[in-house]
Image (cartoon, rainbow, N blue to C red):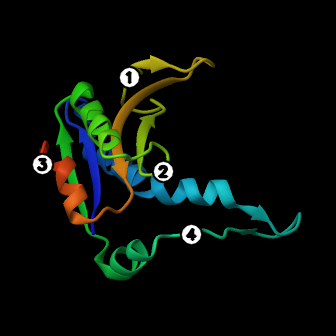
Amino acid sequence: MRQLIIARKDLNMSPGKLASQVAHASWAFLSQKIRSKGERMSLTTDYLVPIVIQKQVYEEWFCGIFTKTICEAKNLKQLLKAKTLAEDLGMKEGEDFFLIWDACLTELQPEKYDEDGTGRTLTCIGFRPLNDETAWKISKKFQLYK
């Protein structure tokens, strides 16, 4: 199993910015589960977050070596090709893959604006841990990030 992350090369992100965006992409599949399941135990205590993780992901990825493959997309169009490839394989956004939109508070300029006027730039797509065969069906269209 491996987690596939594809980051845009054309944005010329600094190493720190790239690392933070890839970290967002890696964490996205878990943070979505945590945000959707969190329940406050009382007004003054912590949250209880029961989440379900597929048996194979737990045994082969969490209890394994957290293998990740980081690939590069030349530009926005190529990054969106990864989204299309995933959807063609039956994957769903917000469940199997996650688009990472930077809030443009530091070094990136907005490519689009939300309805509330917040600028955003699409930097990465991150996938939940996938079996190697499925990850390869997507990653073979991209080169490793250099």
Q: Work out whether 136 lies above or below 8.
A: below
Residue at image x 50%, y 70%?
53
Helix, strand or loop at label 2? It is loop
Q: CA distance from mark 1 to mark 4?
A: 37 Å
Query: Which residue is under mark 2?
Result: 95
Residue at image x 38%, y 49%?
20
Q: CA distance from mark 3 to mark 2?
A: 22 Å
Precedes in sequence: disc 4 or disc 2: 4
Q: Residues within 10 Å of mark 2 (few under 14, many from 20)?
A: some
Q: Residues within 10 Å of mark 1 (few under 14, many from 20)?
A: some
Q: CA distance from mark 4 to mark 3?
A: 30 Å
Residue at image x 34%, y 50%?
22
Which numbered tag is attached to residue 140? Answer: 3
Precedes in sequence: disc 3 or disc 1: 1
Residue at image x 31%, y 43%?
86
Q: Give the x, y percent position of residue 124.
A: 33, 41
Q: Give the x, y percent position of residue 93.
A: 45, 42
Query: Which residue is under mark 1?
Result: 109
Q: CA distance from mark 2 to mark 1?
A: 28 Å
* Quarter of the image that includes the N terminus: bottom left
Task: Pick the residue in front: 90 or 7.
Answer: 90
Q: CA distance from mark 4 to mark 2?
A: 12 Å
- Three-letter residue code for mark 3: Lys
Residue 110 sits in which quadrant? top left
42 horizontally vs 107: left or right? right
- Three-letter residue code for mark 2: Glu
Q: Residues within 10 Å of mark 3 (few under 14, many from 20)?
A: few
